Image: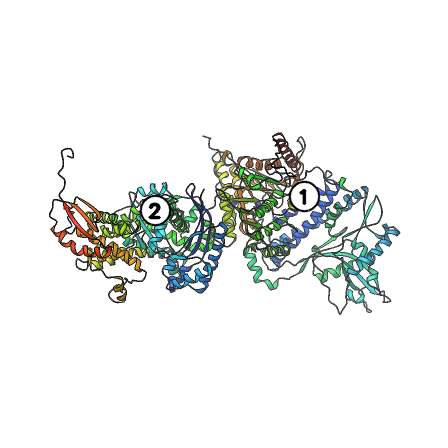
Amino acid sequence: MKAKSEKTKPERGRDFYLNPAFYQNRELSWLQFNRRCLMEARRKETPLFEKLKFLSITSSNLDEFFMVRVASLQDMVNADYNKPDLAGMTPGRQLEAILEAAHEFVQLQYSTYNRSLLPALKEEGLEIVQSVEELSEGEKEFLDRYYETDIYPVLTPMAVDSSRPFPLILNKTLNLGALLRRKGQDTGLLGRGKKGKKKKAAEGLEFATVQVPSVLPRFILLPGEGAPVRIILLEDVIRQHMPLLFTGYDVICVDTFRIMRNADLSIDEDEAEDLLVEIEKQLKKRQRGQAIRLEADSDMDKRLLKLLKENLNLADSEVFSIDGPLDLTFLMKVYGLPGFDHLKEHGYERPQEVPELPAGCDLFAQIRKGDIFLHHPYQSFQPVVDFVAAAAEDPDTLAIKQTLYRVSGNSPIVRSLSRAAENGKQVTVLVELKARFDEENNIGWARMLERAGCHVIYGLVGLKTHSKITLVVRREEDGIRRYVHLATGNYNDSTAKLYTDVGLLTCRETYGEDATAVFNMLSGYSEPRAWNCLSLAPLWLKDRLLYLIGRERDNALNGETARIRAKMNSLCDPDIISALYEASAAGVKIDLIVRGICCLRVGIPEVSENITVRSIVGNFLEHSRIFCFENAGIPQVYAASADWMPRNLDRRVEIMFPLEEPSIAEKAIHILDLELADTEQASILQPDGSYERVDRRGKESVNSQKIFGEEARRAAEQKKENALRTRVFIPETSEGHEE
Amino acid sequence: MAIRTFAAIDIGSYELQLKIFEVSKSRGIREVDSMVHRIELGTDTYRTGKITSRHVAEVKRTLLDFRRVMNVYGARDYKAYGTSAFREMQNASVVLEQIELETGIHIDILSNSEQRFLDYKSIASKGELFNQVIEKDSAIVDFGGGSIQISLFNKDRLVTTQNLRLGVLRIHEQIHSLDAASTAVAPLISELVNAQILPFARLYLKDRTIRNIILVDDYLCALMQQRGISNLSMTEFSELMQRIHVYNRQNLARMLGVRDDNIPLIFISAVMLSRIAEVMKAENIYISGVTLCDGIVYEFAEKQKILPPSHDFEGDIIACAQNISKRYKGSPERSRTLESICLKIFDATKKIHGLSHREELLLRIAAILHDCGRYISMVNLAQCAYDIIMATEIIGLSHKEREIVANVVRYNHEPFVYYEQRAGIVGNSYASGTSISGISREDYLVIAKLTAILRIANGLDRSHRQKFENIRVQVKDSELEILVRTDQDITLEKGMFGKRAAFFEEIYGIHPVIRKKNPKRQTKSEL
């Protein structure tokens, strides 16, 4: 029997661990994450074109952040909702801090673009033309023609004068704003009348705007053969041709601008319920469509800037002065330009065949042999697609049930589900319409599934269904058998090539029973009396996690080995964090891999000294959630669709599933351990909330994503070699020979 | 391997449940799907005696959904039962027909005793644990929407079973109408329970202590099972009660991790169980984890002879009847004699009467309860016996079967009233609780056949002195020959036999005769 630990159980209540000083504000933590992505664009080891991709990602990330999170905070401020967050910051204070950090971040983004990327691109033979002066005569002529034939027909210039109101500038669109003066008019000082009194800008100059059409490519490849490849941005071409749009006027200035609006009428699900009530009460106060950010050329004419600020009702802090092209997401398209493959990352393997599931195998027979673990994108997502496709055509399949959160545009899974329904299977699909930004897409194919005869459930009232589960019910010789696929990632064959996720294929009775119960619940039937192995949010998952963390704490206090290794996208649930603090204080060694938001602070004396947090930002988006609890030497390993966030644990349908097969549990632990050893793509959370890259001195270089790829390749090759070695040659007989 | 897929449907007072099972000799019973739809039908019927059209529509929708699931699994065999909400429904037959027409699902209404018997069967089917628990003084406390059934066991035999109108939903309705403060809800429930459990304890518990309670319910059991609890001591249960003693729906939902619409029923069940356990001085509570659907499939498997019986349920029914007889001061010796003679006649005349084993059981119960009316009146014992039997639940018997037993006992003592006669006098002397409705002509024939046997048996022990050491019965040359061995005077038995024999002959067409043989002299070797 092990000796009891010297430690005594800390006599601290939950409130002690909820001290705001122990928490990081989630928005600032998210900005830190985006900064880590930006750092990838600044690292010398990152191939040049990968840098473009990272910079583009930070730009689209920031847009989404403003549209959802900043908009929500703005709502709170408008509703006079002053409840401080976990870190003790009121919404107003958070907004201030976010804007300050965001300004600094944008400066860093553009300094990266201007000082690092543009010169490097030029050196590699790709020039982004920044002014007309840089164009040759031939290029100018080409662009004039292109303007006339392609651009001009889709432009809609809008001017403002006393008879026309300020035009509606659409959210996230790129625009050119101009100040115009009617030809032949007095060229005296703008805005001053005859008596020298101040006048409205519009009296002296007229404002006009034109949206940069989103139907056209953002940049134009200039004619020419070989190096260098030259491109010019669409807005620069329009800018050049502005006088043609406003004949009879002198164009005084033309500058690009872009606004972000609080246009999302649904409240972000991350917010507290009492906030939702408050907002509903104060709906009238809410200024729908209010602009919350203006990005403008850094050298924008001051008069134009003032006019935009006044008409959009924006404070100085909400105006972002941009030293370069607005909306850097175009860099993702630049990434796709042909001829630059040598500037991209090539150290990563393509998705490999899953050794247990060779092409053309009987999937169901293979699953019957034992649970199968899938690790994407190192291993192919095809078995999951095939699983549904096989069930759709299989005469013994009685029913297929699946939850769909986000699927790809032309999803093979959706096609298989339709086919299954046409083949007379009972197909039940829960389509989560509330998946952010995917609503319209989801409605479209949900209708398509319904037309094919599937029973479609359009989400649950008040809850987002985020779980990823498929159930196939077959009638076999020895009775009904259920096959279940559970995963941490969506049923999206496109993102499965970019996101790291894990999945499990099993026909264990306990999983089958639970999966059946999950779908019955999702169909509106009551919860089962008990679960065999799955833990579901919002009712049971948090309790289960708290129990598992608490058990480690108790084990530590009893002198047993106690450790938690966990990997997730975000960590901000106060109940979970305070439980982790309590466990750490009791001596539990806690190693966390949190890619994004982390509200937990490390290094707080006697609170979180035993906790380490690292974030991996790499070639693939880290997306799997894997939790390992030491359990006094008999580790219990789980995978889940849920992060440790209130929205996942309290307001979503999520599933955590155990990896019971020892060899599979080992694989999952290997994922955790290798990522904990990563020296190349990991950043370590510091006590002050910042992140620092791993100090590589004296350490062997470990790039976990590359190693996982190599391991998957080796495993697939090994399997093929073994198959060849054990191959039995079967002589052809006359019976089987057809002329 | 022959696997049959069976669907069990329970239309309860607060939920509709479908369970799909696979039943086979090799693997036994295997549940493959279970769906529960919440719908408080009991709220309608307990209050107004009718079910609202909105609820009828919802039942139809749900059953159509169930039908779809049954089709998916290819479940051709099914059984659907309505329970207390349907029992108390004035327009049940109309509603049932509507439902059947639209959904194709035929629903039978279970009597309370049949329902509880199925619950009981499902617990017993769980095997070892059940047998271990009932070895000691135990009780099954079965919570329903409209009532609670308490069944007491002693040394693995059922002692008694009583139905108390303390259903979870019924109490919920009462509490709801009182609009009590949250702190007053628990005391109010306890008070309502006291009004019935204390008289029950006085009558049936007396000085007995019930050590184990086996709980059958839909909500507390689910709560415990979610936590992986299969039994808990009273100390542990008291700790739970301490935590949930104040009725606050939202807090409790959060604390217990269940949907808040389940909280009222969980809370009421917990307080009721707490009070019952206190009165019984129970030490342990076992979580049965069974539902009526488990009993339905068990019955199916048993009837189809796919599974052998896991417990002597018939023995329980007999034990229950014997306890009723004991309560009404019946003579156990005479009952045994009558039962034995009845069985001999029944066996000998099998080819003539064509009755089944089930009717044989009814005959045995009638024999056991033949004299219970005497407890009330020595003169009007026929009617009193009838009333006692009809007012006393005999677990495992349907209402119709109880009616058959009650009539057999009644006509053992008074002239037989034929079906046609009886039909003509409804609303007169038999109006109170003895309506002929529900008893078909075929059932009435069963009454006549069993009465004829019981009368003969009764006649053979007219003196109540069990004069015959051995009786042999056989059908020989159009006669029912009853060979008795005795050295006692049987003039009385022979004298009274004639009238009874005439009735028997009328029913079976054979003439019963008694033939006496003197007992064999015992040889030395036999000594």
Provide the chain ID for the residue under circle 1: A
Q: Is residue A658 visible?
A: yes
| Secondary structure type for disc 1 | helix
Name the side, left or right, on which B63 lies relative to B331.
right
Q: Amino acid at mark 1?
A: Arg
Q: Nearer the viewer, residue B30 or A685?
A: B30
Are the residues under marks 2 and 1 on the same chain? no
* Residue drawn at the location 67% of the way across and 43% of the way down: A36
Between residue B232 and residue A470, name the one nearer to us.
A470
Q: Residue A599 at x, y = what percent?
A: 59, 46
Q: Is residue A732 above or below residue B440?
A: above
Pointer 1 residue: A36
Vertical arrangement, residue B207 with respect to residue B100, above or below: above
Task: Say which residue appears at 44% left-offset and 55% top-offset.
Answer: B16
Q: Is residue A533 visible?
A: no
Identify the image quadrant of residue A369. Answer: top right
Quadrant where the N terminus of chain A sits is top left
